[in-house]
Amino acid sequence: MSTSAVGTLRLPARIHVGEGSRAQLPTLLAGYGRRALALVDPYVAGTPLFAELLGALRGAGLEVRVSTDVQPELPAASLDASGDLARAYAPDVILAVGGGSVLDAAKLVALLAAHGGPLNRYYGENAVPGPVTPVVAVPTTAGTGSEVTPVAVVSDPDRELKVGISSLYLVPAAAVVDSELALGAPAGVTAHSGIDALVHVVESYTAAPLSPPWDGVLPVFTGRNVFSDTIALEAAGRLARWLPVAVRDPQHREARANLAYGSLLGGMSFGATGTHLSHALQYPVGALTHTPHGLGTGLLLPYVLEAIRGEQETDRRLAELGAALGSSAPSTAGRVDDAISAIVRINGEIGLPGSLADLGVTADQLSRIAELGLASARLVAIAPVPVTHGLLLGILERAHVGALRERSTR
Ligand SMILES: NC(=O)c1ccc[n+]([C@@H]2O[C@H](COP(=O)([O-])OP(=O)(O)OC[C@H]3O[C@@H](n4cnc5c(N)ncnc54)[C@H](O)[C@@H]3O)[C@@H](O)[C@H]2O)c1
Ligand SMILES: [Fe+2]
């Protein structure tokens, strides 16, 4: 194991986690000013819990304008329109209450409110010119970790795939992670968002060691990282243990609390390192099949792990993940096998489809998916192995037939 300590961590200035922590919001928001724009998930906006929160904010003297205009897949044009409205309202702070879609939308509205559009000026890495309107992020799903990450993902009809905007300026000013907000969420939402958190943790822990250019502009995602190494392992066991419980029993408070914390840790971890091949391949798979982000990353992850195993340090890391997921196999290879099997088993328990064919992907589409995956240069660079079209095609062919499916019963 390397003894060198190299890392970068960029996080919100405040993070609160715990059931009931939303009670901090009136004081927290007032610290930024009096005018708040609240971007709220349309489902969540109709719940008594949100009505109560809004009452508390207004009761504390805040002027809050609520918008639920967050469209699925975040089309760039819809965000440009929201950005214009936000610029006119000139909020002191943007409150985001929702899943990853709402949190990502809020980061981009904050960017547009501060610097103007169109959004496509900022596509890619490090194109945001400076600080944005402060965002206070309150997740209502346990999954994306977007409440602490420097990235937001949008769709654009001019692009075949969804496109990321990443900048350290997109890290929210504060995150309030209150697991009660996800209590009762349906099994599908819980499964698809929760498995993505586990993918973030595993891909972050197995990220490539990049050499940061300390004397230049740092990339947003800096590869394997001393901070993430600790954070990711802590999250893996909690997510693996509690995700199936929350899917089975949506009202399970302890499961929700562990998932909320695990997903927050996942964001803290991958927000620094980046993610790699399950994400590179999910973007084209998602574009083709219109299936949720986490469904694709979760399904692909075991096949990605099969493909990256073999190098000593990666195997050591996969074995540690295996142990965090419950393996007590005596050998490294046995623990790596167990890590892969555990993820296949969790996927089965939470009802994910077992193969890309089940999603409607056909064999003749695999080569094009691999091509598009390879073109995600930022994600491919974070993989711990050299990535070729052949490597990606191999992953996709195994995932297409669900070659690991039988491991779910071991
Ligand atoms: N910025 C990042 O770091 C990052 C990381 C991963 C994914 N993402 C993005 O996040 C998005 C996915 O986010 P998501 O998985 O949180 O889903 P989501 O925000 O798209 O929400 C999915 C569904 O769940 C519902 N929902 C939200 N909270 C609920 C609750 N408490 N109870 C019941 N229903 C609820 C929503 O109304 C919606 O119908 C994708 O667009 C993906 O690209 C961003
Ligand atoms: Fe993800």
Image (cartoon, grey):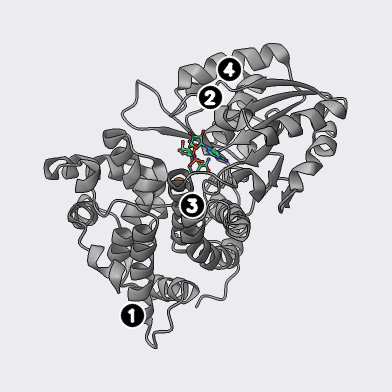
Mark 2 Cα-neighbour bin, 10 Å: few <14, some 14–19, many ≥20: many
Query: Could you tell which of marks 2 and 3 lies nearer the N-terminus?
Result: 2
Question: Looking at the image, which residue is at 71% across and 54% down?
Answer: 18
- The residue that mark 1 highlights is 333
Query: Could you tell which of marks 1 and 3 lies nearer the N-terminus?
Result: 3
Type of the residue with mark 3: Gly
Query: Could you tell which of marks 3 and 4 lies nearer the N-terminus?
Result: 4
Q: CA distance from mark 3 to mark 4?
A: 28 Å
Disc 2: residue Cβ within 8 A of ligand 1's nearest atom: no
Q: For numbered disc 3, what is the local secondary structure? A: helix
- The residue that mark 2 highlights is 70
Q: Is residue 365 above or below residue 248?
A: above
Q: For numbered disc 4, what is the local secondary structure? A: helix
Q: For numbered disc 2, what is the local secondary structure? A: loop
Task: Evaluate whether residue 223 shows in this view.
Answer: no
Q: Nearer the viewer, mark 1 or mark 2?
A: 2
Return the x and y of residue 253 as percentages of the image width and height. Answer: 63, 56
